[in-house]
Amino acid sequence: MADAMINLTIDDVPVSVPPGTLVIEAAKQAGVLVPHYCYHPGLPVAGVCRMCLVEVEKAPKLQIACATPVAEGMVVKTQTPQAKDARQGVLELLLINHPLDCPICDQAGECELQDFVFQEGRPGTRYADYAKRFNPVEDFGPDVLYVPNRCILCTRCVRFMEDVAQEPVLNVSERGDRAFIGIHPEARLDHPWAGNVVDLCPVGSLLSKDFLHKARAWELDKTASICTGCSQGCNVTLDTRDEVVVRVRPRPNLEVNRYFICDHGRMNYRWMNRGDRVDAPLVRRDGALHATDWDEAFARVLTILRGASGKAVALVSPGASSEALSLARRLFSGFDWTGAFQVVMGEEAPLAGVPNLALRAERAPNATGAEQLGYSRDYAAALTAAESAAVVLVLDDPDCAVRTSGALIYAGAVLGPDAPCRAAEVVLPLANVAEEDGTFVNRDGRVQRYFQAKPAPGMARPAAWVLGELTAALGVAEVS
Amino acid sequence: MGFPHKPHPKETVVLSQYFGDQEARTYKGWVKRGGYEALAQALKMAPAAVTEVVKESGLRGRGGAGFPTGLKWSFMPKEKKKPHYVCVNADESEPGTFKDREIMRWTPHALLEGTAIAAHAIQADVAYIYVRGEFTEPWTILEKALTEANAAGVFGTIKLYLHRGAGAYICGEETALMNSIEGKRGNPRIKPPFPAAAGLFGMPTTINNVETLAAVPHILTRGAAWYKGLCLSNPKSTGTKLFSVCGHVQRPGNYEVTLGFPLKDLLYELSGGMPAGRTLKACIPGGSSVPILNREESEACLLDYEGCVAAGTMLGSGGVIVFDDSADMVYQIMRLARFYAHESCAQCTQCREGTAWTTKILERILAGQGKTQDLDLLLDLAENMTGKTICVLSDSCAAPVVSGIKKFRNEFEDYLAGKRKPVMVA
């Protein structure tokens, strides 16, 4: 449909975009980021910050790139003196009441106000003689603080709650320079997706209490990952500082989660930093588990597998990667195999304004993957089968109430002092999701990759490596 | 001018003919004066034909922008696929303007009739009259008039509703007015889409000022040619217009004159000139949002859309604010800026922060604490506030500041140089 495309020029770069595209989006295609605050691709256009003013040839005055649709033959210039002056003017006005408390602001380093002021703002202010407007910090909700002094009234948060979450508890209160973001007097910002307003806020006005003063943005390493909170498979970024996951933020994926994640997923990271990890392989000797090296642990597993025949049971976590699940199955290719997983269920919490996006009742990231690889949801039956099986593998399911007369192999990241899996012959220490690469299959069958954000503790290794070593040693073929 | 004075011989009395006439307020009295004949006539005509007559008459919007009314009506979809609406802008809040109030007070039926004719012309079933919240008396009178007219069944299938504002100046901006009717915060919307495409409730809508619609029945009964003939200067500005004269004149009030009338005559003859011993210093001819004229410019200005532009200002709403030589222009401009700072809807950055900052600088100059670079700063701010926002509120704040500094720079400089006694403003 090349002839249906609209051709235009942005800063002398020709681009072709579908009709109806906004100039600000077309500019991205030309490699031009038009500075903006109120515009966000996931929200309805407001056109209020007036920051994205650009020159459009033949237009009598500057146009806002966020609300101007492209037209055939349009010539857009973002760097003319007129456009730059206008944007500099907006920046100066945005700063007159801004406290410039960047040294104690969580947003510093990833603040759009900071970025654009550095990029094209004035070196000084002409507002020097006046006291800045002051309003106290407000507690908006379980995880959200509002710092009105830093607010630039872009209304992204208001529009998110109104149009995307469809629970309009925020508004712009008052008028003129007295305006601030107000919350319904009897409401809290406790919608299950409310945390997104913190990400949407271009400045440090809406803050996450969870992340408050925890780290500076420039100290963080960012790793692409997939949320493990439910079967939706939201794309996220894991922010780590000194090998500790400190924050989870949404990573845009228009097909899965657009620009958002729910608060459940956002808070679902502390376990990745747990200290009570199994950090060395353990083998049973004289009735007790003893730490050892991988060679001895592998040798013990191989002895068990080579010496056994008949029934084998795998009790796996639906949070394990597809690679691990596949190899765990291949390990038992000579056996009469049963594999099963169980999923913790919770309450479903949809995001009203986005179709097919919800915190799903099924609180595991890879149940679909496990099912596709032949694992059953009939966990109870598998537990019963395990009682009389020759070999039982428990994969990363530390609380599994397994009992067996056969040999028990436990592979996992943690193992509690009273866990039934303490009865294992061998314990193989595994990396958790933040410490390995892998893929999950979300509820819609979408295979999504996640990456290692931090090293695994001690001798713990990714499940795919551990199981891969074992299958290689056994020389087993592909599962038929 | 009507009530409480007799019209001046130089006035052309059309809209204000029954000002002061208690009986004209009633349905019966209005019918006796030829009222609702135009509506009956219009309802027999095809909608497009009504629009054509108004187009032919040259009637232009009296709210401020001066857009040709017939042309505006003709922008409505010819084929009605969605409900059409008429909105009447009776949110007259422009400082210095009080013409619509008088129309609603004395001739409420003229407005209702004009509204119904407009509704017929654009094929609307429903019309909303958005009345300024502070207008308690016009509201009561309009309510009574509407009840009477409804009881008489003159509107046929057209439904008229009164909607009362809550006191925001910005709700006089057409799209903010529509948001307000919809029950939302009165924030202006980005245009396009224009109201004729997506207005009230997202449907095609025409919005007109009270004075514009009140003129429509006269045009229908007396003919487009008659209205077009009411013209003293430029043929693009036809008909009569009410000018609300206030400030330093001996007889403030509403005067109805034919467009093209000299501002000088309006000031010195119709409104009786300045108080004794005083001379004209400045005049804002079109409500607070237009550039200020100095004495020479005022005396040369012709009151029509083109004449005002030629004089460097705009006809606006016809709110003539007069300052004599006792006026402190710095103070007056500060008062205007403060009004806009108070009324800014807080959407656009330039307006939200710019109006407030402008006010602060003007207050500082008045207090004798101004700095030499303040005038340049004001002009630079004004430049930033002009033509860059959703609506024209910030432009309106900038206009008097820019023209004020240009024309009365010496007064500002006197404050800056400490030659004037500082004024502390609360």
Image (cartoon, rainbow, N blue to C red):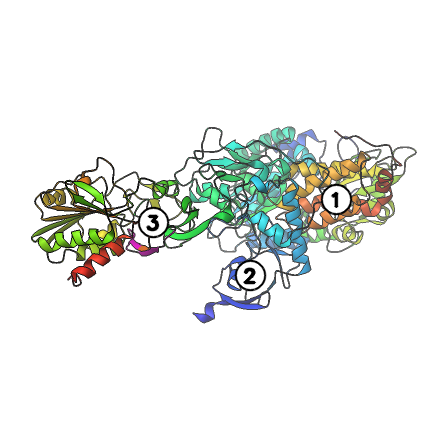
Q: Is residue A442 above or below residue B149?
A: below
- Toward the viewer: B180 or A418? A418
Q: Where is residue B282 in the image (x, y as percent from the top left)?
A: 83, 42
Q: Mark 1 points at which residue?
A: B286
- Toward the viewer: A410 or B63? A410
Alpha carbons under labels 3 and 2: distance apart: 40 Å
| Corner quadrant of residue A126 | top right
**Residue A321 visible in the picture:** yes
In the rendered image, residue A440 lying in the magenta stretch gets the answer: yes
Circle 1 Cα neighbour tier, 10 Å, few/some/many (<14 / 14–19 / ≥20): many
Q: In which quarter of the image is the N terminus of chain B?
A: top right
Asked if the residues shown at circle 3 and circle 2 are in contact, with their CB atoms under 8 angstroms apart, the answer is no
User: Residue at the spot x=30%, y=38% of the render?
Assistant: A347
On the rendered structure, is A285 left or right of B130? left
Q: Mark 3 points at which residue?
A: A456
Q: Where is residue A368 in the image (x, y as percent from the top left)?
A: 25, 51
On the rendered structure, is B345 left or right of B423? left
SS at mark 2 in the image: loop
Q: Are marks 3 and 1 on the same chain?
A: no
Circle 3 Cα neighbour tier, 10 Å, few/some/many (<14 / 14–19 / ≥20): many
| Corner quadrant of residue A248 | top left
Q: In this view, does A449 lie above or below B11?
A: below
Tell which tag, 3 or 2, sits nearer the viewer.
3
Region rendered in magenta: A439-456
Alpha carbons under labels 2 and 1: distance apart: 43 Å
Q: In this view, does B148 lie above or below B314?
A: above
Q: Mark 2 points at which residue?
A: A32
Q: Residue furthest front?
A: A286
